Image: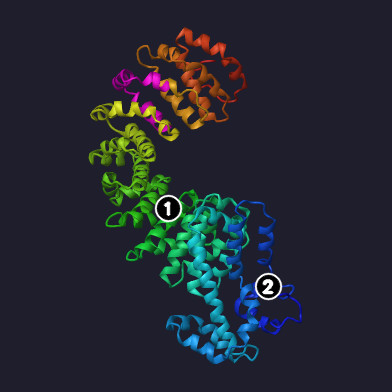
Amino acid sequence: MAGSGATHPGQANRDPIVKILGPEYGTVEGEDMSMLHLLDKVKKDDDPETEMKMKISRLLHQLDLQLLNSSLKQFSHKTSGRFEEVSESSSEAEEDEEQPVRHQEGNTDLPSEYWGIQKLAKYLKIGSLKILKEISQNTLIRHAIADLGGLQIMVKILDSPDKDLKCLAAETIANVARFKQARRTPSYRLAIRTEGMIENLVKNLSSEHEELQMHCASAIFKCAEDKETRDLVRQHGGLQPLSVLLGNTENKKLLAAVTGAIWKCAISRENVSRFREYKVVEALVELLTDQPEEVLVNIVGALGECCQEPINRTIIRKCGGIPPLVKLLTGTDQALLVNVTKALGACATEPENMMIIDRLDGVRLLWSLLKNPNPDVQASAAWAICPCIQNAKDAGEMVRSFVGGLELIVNLLKSKNKEVLASVCAAITNIAKDEENLAVITDHGVVPLLSKLANTNNDKLRRHLAEAISHCCMWGSNRVAFGETKAVAPLVRYLKSNDPSVHRATAQALYQLSEDPSNCITMHENGVVKFHAQCSYDWEWNNGYDL
């Protein structure tokens, strides 16, 4: 590596490099030498992946152009004519990109040789970035890039005037951000808080180059799983350009990236409100037909998040969005099925929407997805069924019309997936409100299956399981059966939870179970009075029953 002493042969050449590429690429004492510390950091690291990190740090090292600086002596012997040959071999587009810099050739401080060095610098950076982009597909390497400060370098490149470099940097950021653990590293947090990463991504959404827009939208798509990122996109004015880009329907890669970014940004309620101002829901509904599945997954995901606001559920209906959503239930793409069931479930909370879903046989299609082998699809379908039952005109009859449907949902209580179990318990709570259907699921063995789940520490499952047990107590000798199948003692322990919703559901279940004397004894033996004294919630809703 070139030193920083005044006697180094390349000393006279450094200032032009700094002028061309920025102060971070200099090696003169007092200038930014952050990359010089990367190798030291890796050498001191006892991580078993040290060799890999060393190779990545070298790539990052090249990106900071220390390699170029160390080679200046060799480059300076080349004639300007040689560099003109390199220039002539480049494309017209590249010459255009470099025009703003070439206008400075009249500057006597910058000999013509350095415009050739500029091109070599660009090629060096492009080569390193292309390698980083490719290897960042690997999960371990994505983490290493973030850990070694690679994101900060990408952010600097995003602010450069070169489109090719910016595209590669944005694509690398998107790859690194795909890895959730990388988004939690101090390096990532530093990049978004102090290096202006999100601000630069947002700024480039307004570029006239569609490829750059696509890579920046894709990076936002991957980064916006993080709440702070979603807030920064809004604060830097990124929601409007994303909304505008929905109008570019011909470029499907760009549309996939933009709809993905909108989907993830819409996780935040504040962003949903802003999207409503830009009429994003209307635009998304228009895009529901004749799109690649990659685009549809994102569109439907975005609609599902936008349904957080009740008015958007109405907008979807008025724009004719429910029929195409129901039609998508017949597809096979697993990610799309998860998103469309969520969106329809949200829409079904409005009775007018539910009428359309029912008329289009949407509830039957949702129920059939309980047979899908993917647990994510099963859970999403079961959650969607809940508001459908709650808002159907004759829910009991509708449920009974699905041949084998009740047996199917009871059997899902044998699943090993906690989300499936919680969603199925929630569906059973709604099914059990109809006495005839409660009798049928009792015959299918719902009581012992629910009891078997009682020894769980998962609060989400605890809450919905307790609610299901409470409603299933309303039939025949089910209260006694829950006691015999050892559900009571574990329920008492739910009162130790820190979740008030678990407390409420548990109190309701224990109240129903306490109508059987044997269950009262079990509760007392397991300290229900002690737990009651420790809990600080309101029992008034519970018919005034004091546990």
Closest to the observer, 338 or 498: 338
User: As displayed, is residue 83 above or below residue 401?
Assistant: below
Question: Disc 1 residue type?
Answer: Trp
How far, Cα to Cα, is label 2 from label 1? 46 Å
Question: Does dot 2 land on a helix, a strand or a loop?
Answer: loop
Q: In this view of the protein, which residue sits in the foreground, 450 or 193? A: 450
Residue 479 seen anywhere in this rendered image of the structure: yes
- Magenta residues, dominant SS class: helix
Q: Which mark is residue 263?
A: 1
Q: Which residue is mark 2?
A: 1
Q: Position of residue 191 (x, y in %)?
A: 60, 60
Residue placed farthest to the right in the image?
Answer: 6
- Circle 2 packing at 10 Å, graded few (<14), some (14-19), many (20+), is few
Task: Give the magenta range.
Answer: 422-450
Residue 384 drawn at (x, y percent): 36, 38
Could you tell me which residue is drawn at 34 percent across and 27 percent down? 411
